Image: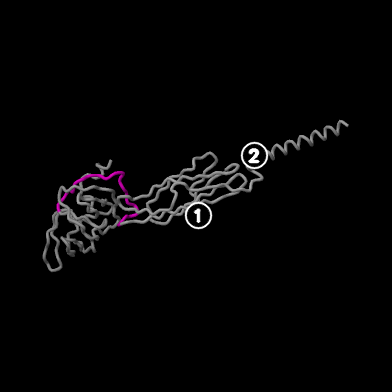
Amino acid sequence: MRSKILKWSLISAVVIIILSLAGWLYLQGYILDREPPEVSIIRPSRSRVITLSPKNPRVKEVFQIKAVDNRALDRVVLLLNDSQIKSFGRGDKLSFEWETKNRGKYVFKALAYDRAKNKKESKPVTITVKVEGILPADYTGFQKPVKVYVGASNVFLREGPSVTYGVIKILKHREEVLVFGKWASKSPDEAITTDRVNLITPDGGSIELDRGKALLIVKREDPYYIVSVQIDNRKLTGKLPVSAVKSISDRPWYYVRTKEGKEGWVFGEFLGNVEGSSE
């Protein structure tokens, strides 16, 4: 008799434990839940197009996600072009800061999972990034524009950061400009003159070039460089002594705007103390 009572007591205890566990699993949302969560990207709430430029060289966007479940959420995942970029656990703030400097089409989606492994995908939000003008990949934009003055006469404001680009305007000595950012050329062919020097033209004539004149090295024929140089609106080819030419590889070009609103690129040696002013 006592053994039967003990047996039924054990069975009752096991049943109570199982029912308690099942109740806890149910209340916590692990079982008997077939309803998926609700999830949406609430910021940005719609797709948009953003244009990058040297004045606005990067995109910064804060994504905020809203996710709810009838029982209990397990986790939320943010996807970029179908690849996971952020996972949020229970109790995490559903916010993520994303930035890029590259053009492209970026499709964001959020996935929410509950404890019963049901999942739901949000509607996508697409950010299309375009580039206006010339924006090199490793361009560095300043936090705010810097006011400086042109440090030489007849300085070319160019369409791009190279002596091969066309001239927008000729800047005067002490002319005020705003500087928005910089980029350093890696081309070993770009150079400037180190002093006043005469360019020997193919017909045997010569043209005096100022110190710091931008030019392009075509080839080397010791003791000369064959160079291409722009004078006013003309491109000329001639010879310069090797000792009178200095490479400007790894030297900065700056994106600037004049008081009249003209925008373009100026080689750094022709401007004032940009780096000191930007600190």
Q: Nearer the viewer, residue 250 or 115?
A: 115
Mark 1 highlights which residue? Answer: 82
Q: Determine whether label 1 and label 2 are within 8 Å by CB.
A: no
- Residue at horizontal 30%, vertical 57%? 134
**Relative vertical location of residue 69 with respect to residue 186 in this rendering, above or below:** above
The part of the image, by quadrant, that contains residue 20 is top right
Q: Quadrant of the C terminus?
A: top left
Q: Residue at x 20, y 49 (%)?
A: 259
Q: Is residue 261 magenta?
A: no
| Residue 98 horizontal side relative to residue 68, left or right | left
The percent coordinates of residue 126 (x first, y second) are: 44, 54
Q: Which residue is mark 2?
A: 27
Residue 187 image-quadrant placement: bottom left
Q: Amino acid at mark 2?
A: Leu
Decide: few, some or many residues near mark 1? Use Cα within 10 Å; few <14, some 14-19, many ≥20. few
Q: Which mark is residue 118?
A: none
Give me the C-alpha separation between circle 1 and circle 2: 33 Å
Depth check, mark 1 against mark 2: the one in front is 2
Which is nearer the eye, 19 or 215? Answer: 19
Asked which secondary structure carries label 1, the reply is loop
Determine the residue located farthest toward the bottom in the rendered image.
203
95 shown above or below 207: above
Amino acid identity at mark 1: Asp
Seen as rendered, the residue at the extreme top is 2
Residue range highlighted in magenta:
133-153
* Among the two numbered marks 1 and 2 on one chain, the one whose residue lies closer to the N terminus: 2
User: Quick check: 31 left or right of 152?
Assistant: right
- Please name the colour scheme applied to the rendered image: one colour
